[in-house]
C-alpha cells in the first residue's frame, strides 16, 4: 500500500520540481505545470498521463485507476487510489 511519503521524496529530488500546497492539498509542479497532486485526505493521487492512453490504463485495472472529474478531462490526467498501489508503482507513475 502506497502513501504520500513514498512519492514525496521522489518529487523533491526531481530537477526543477517544487512541492506546493494549494488549498491544503500537496501538489508537485515544474514551473506552473502540476504533474502530481494528492487529495486532502491523501487517499488519491492524480498524475499527468497521456490522454490517448488513459482509457487503456483505467480499463486495465479500474480498482486502482479512474478518470478525473468531468471538468478535468481536458487535461492529461488520471487518478489512482493510493491504497491499491504498491510504493514502487506509485513512484513509477510519478
Image (cartoon, rainbow, N blue to C red):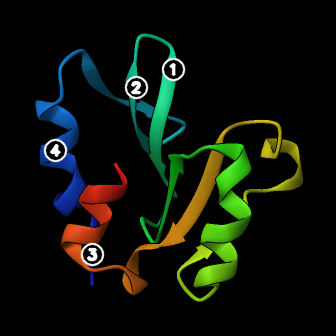
Q: CA distance from mark 3 to mark 2?
A: 20 Å
Badge 2 is on which residue?
A: 29
Disc 3 crowd, CA 10 A, few/some/many (<14, 14-19, 20+): some
Residue 60 lies, in percent from the top left, at 61, 82
Give the class, few, some or many, for how many residues have Cα within 10 Å of label 2's Cα (few <14, many ≥20).
Answer: some
Task: Specify whether 14 is left or right of 34.
Answer: left
Residue 2's tag is 3
**Label 4 sits on residue:** 10
Looking at the image, residue 90 sits to the left or right of residue 67; the answer is left
Q: CA distance from mark 1 to mark 3?
A: 24 Å
At which x and y percent is residue 12?
16, 33
Q: Which residue lies under the disc numbered 1?
A: 33
Element marked by disc 3: loop
Label 2 – label 4 distance at C-alpha:
12 Å
Label 4 element class: helix
In what element is the residue under mark 1?
Answer: strand
At a point 70% along the width and 79% down the height, the residue shown is: 59
Amino acid at each position: 500500500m502506497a502513501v504520500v511519503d513514498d512519492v514525496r521524496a521522489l518529487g523533491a529530488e526531481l530537477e526543477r520540481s517544487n512541492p506546493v500546497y494549494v488549498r491544503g492539498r500537496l501538489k508537485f509542479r515544474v514551473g506552473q505545470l502540476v504533474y502530481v497532486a494528492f487529495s486532502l485526505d491523501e487517499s488519491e493521487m492524480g498524475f499527468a498521463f497521456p490522454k490517448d492512453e488513459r482509457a487503456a490504463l483505467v480499463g486495465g485495472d479500474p480498482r486502482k485507476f479512474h478518470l478525473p472529474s468531468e471538468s478535468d478531462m481536458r487535461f492529461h490526467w488520471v487518478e489512482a487510489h493510493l491504497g491499491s498501489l504498491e510504493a514502487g508503482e506509485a513512484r513509477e507513475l510519478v
